[in-house]
Image (cartoon, grey):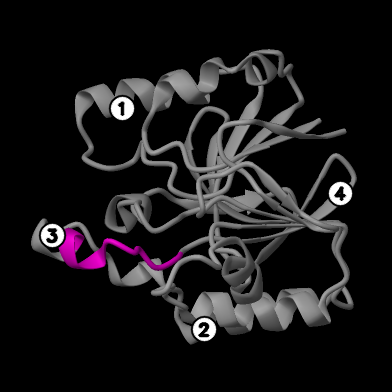
Amino acid sequence: MICVIGDTHGDYSRFSHKKIKALKSGDYLIICGDFGFVWDGSAREEALLKKIGSKRYTTIFLTGSHDNYELLEKYPPMEFMGGTARHICGRLYMLISGEVLEIDGHKLFVFGGGSASDIDARLENDTWWEQEVPDESLLENGLKNLSAIENKVDYIFTHEPPGSIAEFLERESSNLPMSRLNIFFDKLKGEVAFKMWFFGKLHRNKLVPPRYMSVFDEPYIIE
C-alpha cells in the first residue's frame, strides 16, 4: 500500500493521522515536497529523523521549496526501487528528481523542487537554495528516464503542479508565479501516459478531475 500526503514542514504531528498510523511493514508513505525535517542539523532534528526512520513502514519524500538542499546533499545516493534516492536513516529516503521507481508493482515518476512565493523574505533570512529550481540536466535526465519506458507510468509525484493546473486552482490569484518546473510539467502532462498525478505545493486536499490530486493533510491511499 502507498499513502500520499503533502508538505509536512517539520511538523511531527502529521504522522499521527489514523491512516498513517495504520500503515504496516511493507507499506510506503510518500511526502510530496517540503519535508522540513532536514533543516538545521540540530540534535532534536536528528532524533526526529531517527523516529521517522524507525517506523514499520518506509517514508520517502520529494524536495520542495522549503528544504535545506545543502544538508540533504550530504546524504549518500543509493539504488532504490529501480531508481536512485538519498538514504537519510533507517526506512527514510529522499527521492532524487527525474527518477523512475517501481513500488508495489506501480511505476512512479518523481520530481521535486519548486519556487517559493515568499522568496524575497527568505533571501533576507538566508534560507534560499539555488537547487530549489532544478537545472536543465535534471530535466533532461527525467525526459531520458521516461523515454526509456516509452513515456508510460502509473503515477507521477511532484511538489509543484503543472502550470495549467496551478492556474485553475489559483485562478483568483492575480500574481501567480510560473517557474521552469510548472512549464516543464505542462509539457509532460501532454506527452506521458499516467493514471494520477499528485502534488503538494498548494497545501490543499483537492481532486482536479480526472487525474490530478493536490494533497496536503488528508492522506490518499493507493492500494
For numbered disc 4, what is the local secondary structure? strand
Q: Nearer the viewer, residue 198 or 100?
A: 198
Q: Name the residue at 21% across, 40% down.
A: 40
Mark 4 surroundings within 10 Å by alpha-carbon count, few (fewer than 14), some (14 through 19), many (20 or more):
few
Q: Name the residue at 47% across, 63% down.
A: 113
Residue annotated with mark 1: 46
Of labels 2 and 3, the one closer to you: 3
Q: Nearer the viewer, residue 173 or 189?
A: 173
For numbered disc 3, what is the local secondary structure? loop
Q: Position of residue 198 (x, y in %)?
A: 69, 53
Of mark 4 and mark 2, the one earlier in the sequence is 4
Mark 1 surroundings within 10 Å by alpha-carbon count, few (fewer than 14), some (14 through 19), many (20 or more):
some
The amino acid sitting under disc 3 is Asp
Q: Position of residue 209 (x, y in %)?
A: 82, 57
State the quadrant of the C terminus: top right
Of mark 3 and mark 4, the one earlier in the sequence is 4
For numbered disc 2, what is the local secondary structure? helix
Of labels 3 and 1, the one closer to you: 3
The amino acid sitting under disc 4 is His
Give left or right: position of 164 versus 11.
right
Tell me if I can see residue 200 in this picture.
yes
Q: Name the residue at 42% across, 75% down.
A: 177
Labels 1 and 2 touching (C-beta < 8 A): no
Residue annotated with mark 2: 137
Give the extent of the magenta segment: 114-122
The amino acid sitting under disc 1 is Glu
Q: Give the Cα separation between the discs numbered 1 and 2.
A: 31 Å
Residue annotated with mark 4: 106
Q: Give the Cα separation between the discs numbered 3 and 1.
A: 22 Å
* Residue 126: mark in rendering: 3
Q: Name the residue at 45% across, 66% down.
A: 114
Q: Is residue 60 above or below residue 27?
A: below
